[in-house]
Amino acid sequence: MTENKLNILLAEDDLNLGILLVDFLESRNVKVTLFRDGESAFNGFKKGDFNFCILDVMLPKVDGFTIAKKVKTINAATPVVFLTARGMKEDKMKGYDIGADDYITKPFDEDELWCKIVAISKRTDLVCASTEKVFKIGMYEFDFENLSLNFQDSIKRLTTREAEILRMLCQSKNNLVRREQILTAIWGENDYFAGRSMDVFISKLRKYMSQDPNVQIENVIKVGYILNC
């Protein structure tokens, strides 16, 4: 999805900020719809054709974290950026654990927000443009395009971020993939919070593939990971 194809769902209960963001984003030639509470935002997502979500965390009726979980259930590939006045580490980790693509603390610079939107959009385009979609991982079959990890008769649906990480590991199977390479390609930045979030996702992937003892994601401490299979 390139930026001129974006149809953004914006959930923000502060009307002044919401209107400013709508005007700013529309000036970048993208479509954006403002919702002022979580309930209407999620209902709007179900009825619309949105391909990008910007969610305030502290929303009336339904909070942003809950909306993001529901959005990812419907379409795990939809990028989600949180906007919030809460900058606590626990909140950021929760947001990234849900599968957020970024977490921006208020007050913020509009141009910075736009740069992040463009970077996430380009990263999504790059991932989707790859010709290699299905990977064999020991007894597992990983279908990147359909976000599925298949083992015998069972199917595990992955989040977009889980799939992106696993794909990078598969592309360098039995070889080292550096932490900063994963963080820059998928998170768009290499910082403490993104690093902690990546560690959570790696732990989840290990759990998903634990039924085949020959499949291991080896941690090369402070350097990166190797998918051995």
Image (tube, grey):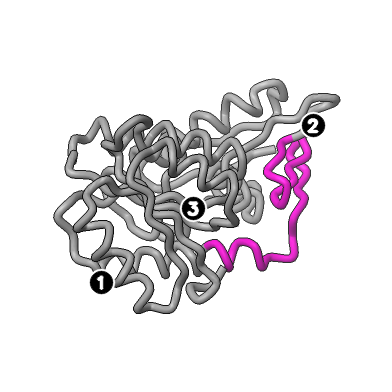
The residue pinned by badge 1 equals 111
Q: CA distance from mark 2 to mark 3?
A: 30 Å
As helix, strand or loop, the secondary structure at mark 3 comes to: loop
Label 2 crowd (10 A; few <14 / some 14-19 / many >=20): some
Q: Is residue 139 above or below residue 46?
A: above
Within 10 angstroms of label 1, few (less than 14), some, or many (20 or more) residues?
Answer: few
Horizontally, residue 68 falls left or right of residue 210, namely left
Location of residue 216 (image quadrant): top right
Work out whether residue 80 or residue 169 is closer to the camera in this orientation and state it: 80
Query: Please, is residue 228 above or below residue 153 in the view?
Result: below
Q: Is residue 15 magenta?
A: no
**Picture disc at residue 79:** 3
C-alpha span from label 1 to label 3: 18 Å
Q: Quadrant of the C terminus?
A: top right
Residue 214 in percent (x, y) is at 70, 28
Residue visible at 35% across and 78% down in the picture: 27
Instruction: Name the amino acid type tagged 2.
Output: Met
